[in-house]
Image (cartoon, rainbow, N blue to C red):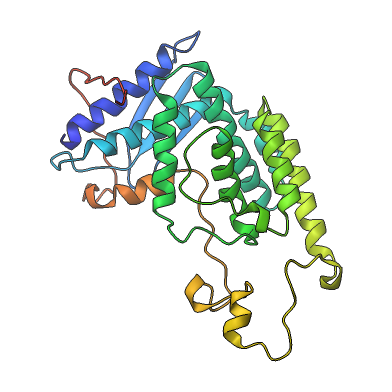
């Protein structure tokens, strides 16, 4: 399909899913293909704006891109339906960015499960599962079990595994120094029914991580056997120490991976972006809507 058809399909799907699953129709609903941004903004539950990267309408897109964008639309509508932004914003005020990201990592799987169980969108589970797998495909090295800055992404992936998604990477939480706290948080979040509950769970996890970090190293429980005198560097590496082969030779952790799929969508659409001095495209996706039912064999 070309970019114009893709835009019409996404807009029509966004409108149809929301309007047929809301007691009161939106006062305003807008889709902006704007710069390189992907996300949703709403001033109230009746006014929503979906932002997607500006694309070149004359280019051809694989149908998989449409499925990915619709999965993204479903996730963003899930935030509109089920996330209490006011509670979230109040909780992170004055706190570190890590708390905000921990909430995000626990909240995304929760709202996705809400969307799936509500049957608001046809085949939501398959589309959301596919979107998650595409995010993982962009990070083949995945993350390390003790990488605190990437705990939010780890929570987002493992929360989706609890939702029943097929996840093509192993669960590394048992190897984490915060394994117990992470596991408790995931299990509690899986049964949470509101953003407020997620906030409480995330704060508890945040406090547990900070408490563990403050413990003297000698007090921490060590996993495995200590290095023995005479061990070679190769043997030490096999015991779990950083080596060149595990992409951590300089001792630095991987750059934090964004929990929300917006950045991943933007990267996917980079080769299709619209080249314009303005940096954005305000043209509407006009014409008779092309509506797809997203069912898979």
Q: Locate residue 86: give its quadrant.
A: top right
Name the residue: 63% across, 28% down.
84
- Please state which of residues 193 and 272 is positioned toward the viewer in this rendering: 193
Q: Residue furthest left?
A: 58
Does residue 241 sit above or below 63 in this rendering?
below
Position of residue 1 in the picture relative to residue 115 (left or right): left
Q: From where the camera sits, is residue 145 visible?
A: yes
* Location of the C terminus (image quadrant): top left
Does residue 2 sit above or below 246 in this rendering?
above
* Location of the N terminus (image quadrant): top left
Name the residue: 40% across, 39% down.
131
Name the residue: 56% across, 49% down.
153
Q: Residue furthest top?
A: 23
Q: Position of residue 112 (x, y in %)?
A: 52, 30
Q: Locate residue 88: give its quadrant.
A: top right
Q: Position of residue 67 (x, y in %)?
A: 31, 33
Q: Position of residue 279 (x, y in %)?
A: 29, 49
- Please state which of residues 272 and 112 is positioned toward the viewer in this rendering: 112
Q: From where the camera sits, is residue 73 visible?
A: no
Position of residue 23 in the picture relative to residue 38 (left or right): right
Does residue 154 sit above or below 283 in this rendering?
below
Q: Residue furthest bottom?
A: 230
Does residue 3 sit above or below 17 in this rendering?
below
Q: How many numbered circles does the render carry?
A: 0
Name the residue: 70% across, 45% down.
183
Q: Position of residue 237 (x, y in %)?
A: 59, 78
């Amino acid at each position: 399909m070309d970019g114009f058809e893709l835009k019409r399909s996404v807009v029509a799907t966004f409108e149809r899913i929301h309007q047929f699953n809301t007691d009161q129709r939106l006062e305003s609903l807008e889709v902006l293909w704007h710069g390189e941004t992907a996300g949703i903004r709403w001033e109230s539950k009746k006014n929503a704006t979906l932002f997607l990267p500006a694309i070149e309408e004359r280019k051809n897109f694989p149908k998989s891109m449409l499925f990915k964008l619709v999965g993204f639309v479903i996730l963003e509508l899930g935030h509109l339906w089920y996330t209490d932004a006011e509670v979230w914003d109040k909780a992170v005020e004055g706190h570190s960015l890590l708390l905000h990201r921990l909430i995000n990592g626990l909240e995304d799987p929760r709202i996705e499960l809400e969307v799936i169980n509500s049957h608001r969108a046809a085949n939501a589970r398959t589309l959301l599962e596919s979107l998650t797998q595409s995010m993982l495909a962009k990070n083949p090295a995945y993350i390390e079990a003790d990488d605190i800055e990437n705990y939010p992404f780890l929570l987002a992936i493992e929360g989706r595994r609890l939702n029943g998604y097929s996840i093509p990477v192993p669960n590394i939480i048992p190897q984490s120094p915060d394994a117990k706290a992470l596991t408790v948080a995931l299990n509690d979040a899986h049964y949470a029914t509101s953003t407020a509950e997620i906030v409480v769970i995330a704060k508890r996890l945040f406090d547990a991580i900070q408490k563990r970090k403050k413990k003297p190293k000698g007090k921490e429980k060590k996993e495995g056997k200590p290095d023995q005198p005479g061990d070679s560097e190769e043997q030490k590496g096999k015991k779990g120490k950083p080596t060149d082969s595990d992409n951590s030779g300089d001792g630095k952790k991987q750059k934090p991976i964004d929990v929300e799929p917006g950045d991943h969508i933007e990267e996917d659409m980079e080769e299709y972006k619209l080249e314009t001095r303005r940096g954005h495209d305000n043209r509407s996706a006009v014409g008779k809507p092309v509506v797809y039912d997203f069912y898979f064999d």
